Amino acid sequence: MKPSTTARAERETPFGRRTRRSSERQNTVPEAEAVAAKEAAARLAKSPIFADISPTRLARLARGAVMKRLRAGEVMWHAGEPARYVAVIQSGLLRLGRPNAEGETYSYAIFGPGEMVGLYAALDDGVYPSDATAVNNTVEAVKISAEALIDSMQRDPKVGIAVCRGLMQFTAALRAKIEIISAGPVPNRIASLMLYLVSRFGQMQGSHAAFLPLPLTREQIGELVGARFETVIRTLSQWDRAGWFRTTSEGFELLRLDMLRRVLEN
């Protein structure tokens, strides 16, 4: 069941809302907006993308920003919607993908904390080319208006450099997708995907084991590697019996990374 409009609105929170309510009689609107921008800027400063930008410049960039909260399966935006803002992920993971004419969904990439999504479409004044869907229940993102972003780029070259970093991250994720799809048979593609995700989001547990805190379904793995659901199940079941791989409620235990690398080598 889709969340109600009211529920969705409650999880999109303007920065400084409590400040404005509690000091409504004392503060002017510009003062309240400055407090909100400062709060949003503090969030953005935690992202490596914006590491070189001063708090004052970040506050200008963050004017009108809101905090968006999503649960697993909820959508930040749909393909075809006007690209009016970009999202800087604070926690959790977003998956970009879109359905084809037959209704089958294909995922392009997964993005995590500190990364920015929606840049290409927002800078081009276009529409989002794919859905942005929450992978887990802890997704939070700062939504920055495309207008504010472009204005800040024109005022401060460092913001332009930050945007370039974001575009490079996005390009790297698409390049990784190409490498995964071209890795060969389905087991090779799944091994390539898992090793790639471990390199970005994994928690190493020794030299040949890692925990991947990504509760992806078999269908979603199939979307990411371009394989049928049944083939993904068969491959992962074989790895489970061999002691290489184990599914948990919070993600995956990859117990033999060396064997996954061997799959790719072969």
Image: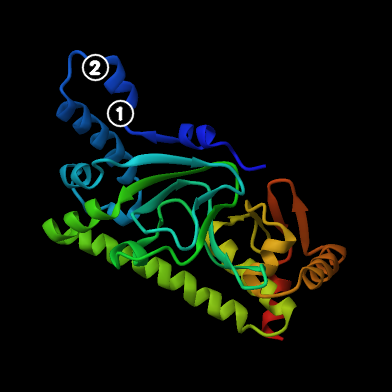
The picture places residue 19, in percent across and down from the top left corner, at 29, 22
Query: Is the C terminus in the top left, top right, bottom left or bottom right quadrant?
Result: bottom right
Q: Which residue is mark 1?
A: 16
* Amino acid, disc 1: Gly
Q: Secondary structure at mark 2?
A: loop
Q: Is residue 245 above or below residue 22?
A: below
* Number of numbered labels in the structure image: 2
Q: Which residue is mark 2?
A: 24
The picture places residue 183, in percent across and down from the top left corner, at 63, 83
- Residue 186 placement, left or right of 164: right
Colouring method of the image: rainbow
> Which residue lies at the image location 84% right of the left edge and 65% below the top edge?
237
N-terminal label among 1 and 2: 1
Q: Secondary structure at mark 1?
A: loop
Question: Dot 1: within a 10 Å radius of its alpha carbon, few (fewer than 14), some, or many (20 or more) residues?
Answer: some
Report the disc number at residue 195. Answer: none
* Amino acid, disc 2: Glu
> Which residue lies at the image location 46% right of the left edge and 67% below the top edge?
129
Q: Is residue 221 above or below residue 64?
A: below
The picture places residue 187, in percent across and down from the top left corner, at 74, 77
> Which residue lies at the image location 18% right of the left edge and 59% below the top edge?
153
> Which residue lies at the image location 59% right of the left edge and 39% below the top edge?
3
